[in-house]
Image: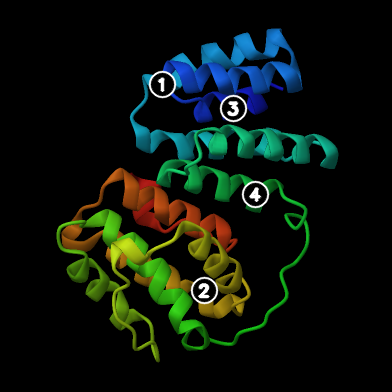
């Protein structure tokens, strides 16, 4: 129960009016006592740097995975409701919900069928996701970050997708397709995204969080660079 309320606390907005609207959703679904606990978690989470949210989610995921299917589905519905309460989805919200959906959704406990032998068969999808990583890593020079990762994708000849053309729902669909890569083909894509996220030997919380979400979506382990940070 505490793990579920912590997740909701991560999604409550700091804006007072929006937060009050989200709190009403929590009260309707879980009751006022739970909403008060969510408030306490929210205040604690606000003291953390933004890049700590996905590592924190990893810490409570073993508890969340013990949820019965109906409780997991309720948590996902409520989390989604909090996210769309203001009619928009931020990158941080998208990343956190993508991990939740992959780990707790109806397909979480089923093997993903292999549909693609190599990443070259998913060149547009790979370029889109790599472009997102590059754009959040170096918004002023995304081509530099993108070009650090592209050579690690054999057979993928694609250009950077401009920031204004990156739609998060398209990224979600791309990740679903990339998860159908053969297991031995996934590490190359993860390495390419890692190269973009750590271009010039450094990263930021947005790029690191993108990389964490990509690994979760592809059911792949975190690269050593992320574990170190």
When the figure is inspected, residue 116 is found, relative to residue 205, above or below; the finding is below
> Compared to 121, does 171 lie above or below?
above
Instruction: Indicate the secondary structure of the residue bearing disc 1.
Output: loop
For the residues marked 1 and 3, what is the alpha-carbon distance in whole angstroms? 15 Å
Residue on which disc 4 sits: 101
Task: Looking at the picture, tell me which residue is in the foreground, 215 or 15.
Answer: 15
Q: Position of residue 45 (x, y in %)?
A: 44, 22
Find residue 159 and name its label. Answer: none
| Circle nearer the viewer, 1 or 4 | 1
Q: Which residue corresponds to mark 1?
A: 15
Residue at image coords 69%, 16%: 27
Q: Give the x, y percent position of residue 104.
A: 70, 46
Inter-mark Cα distance, 1 to 2: 39 Å
Task: Kindly report the distance in space between the C-alpha atoms of the residues bearing marks 4 and 2.
Answer: 20 Å
Q: Which residue is mark 2?
A: 186
> Marks 3/2: CA distance?
31 Å
């Amino acid at each position: 129960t505490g793990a579920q309320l912590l997740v909701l606390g991560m999604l409550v907005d700091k804006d007072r009016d929006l937060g009050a609207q989200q709190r009403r959703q929590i009260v309707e679904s879980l009751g006022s006592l739970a909403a008060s606990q969510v408030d306490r978690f929210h205040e604690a989470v606000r003291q953390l740097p933004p890049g700590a949210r996905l590592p924190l989610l990893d810490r409570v995921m073993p508890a969340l995975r013990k949820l019965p299917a109906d409780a997991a589905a309720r948590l996902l519905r409520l989390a989604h409701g909090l996210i769309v309460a203001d009619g928009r989805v931020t990158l941080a919200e998208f990343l956190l919900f993508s991990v939740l959906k992959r780990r707790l959704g109806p397909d979480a406990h089923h093997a993903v069928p292999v549909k693609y032998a190599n990443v070259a068969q998913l060149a547009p999808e790979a370029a889109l996701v790599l472009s997102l990583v590059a754009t959040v890593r170096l918004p002023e020079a995304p081509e530099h970050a993108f070009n650090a990762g592209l050579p690690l994708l054999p057979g993928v000849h694609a250009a950077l997708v401009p920031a204004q053309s990156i739609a998060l729902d398209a990224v979600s669909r791309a990740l679903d397709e990339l998860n159908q890569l053969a297991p031995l083909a996934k590490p190359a894509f993860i390495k390419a995204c890692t190269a973009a996220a750590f271009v010039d030997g450094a990263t930021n919380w947005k790029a690191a969080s993108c990389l964490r979400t990509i690994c979760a979506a592809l059911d792949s382990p975190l690269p050593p660079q992320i574990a170190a940070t």
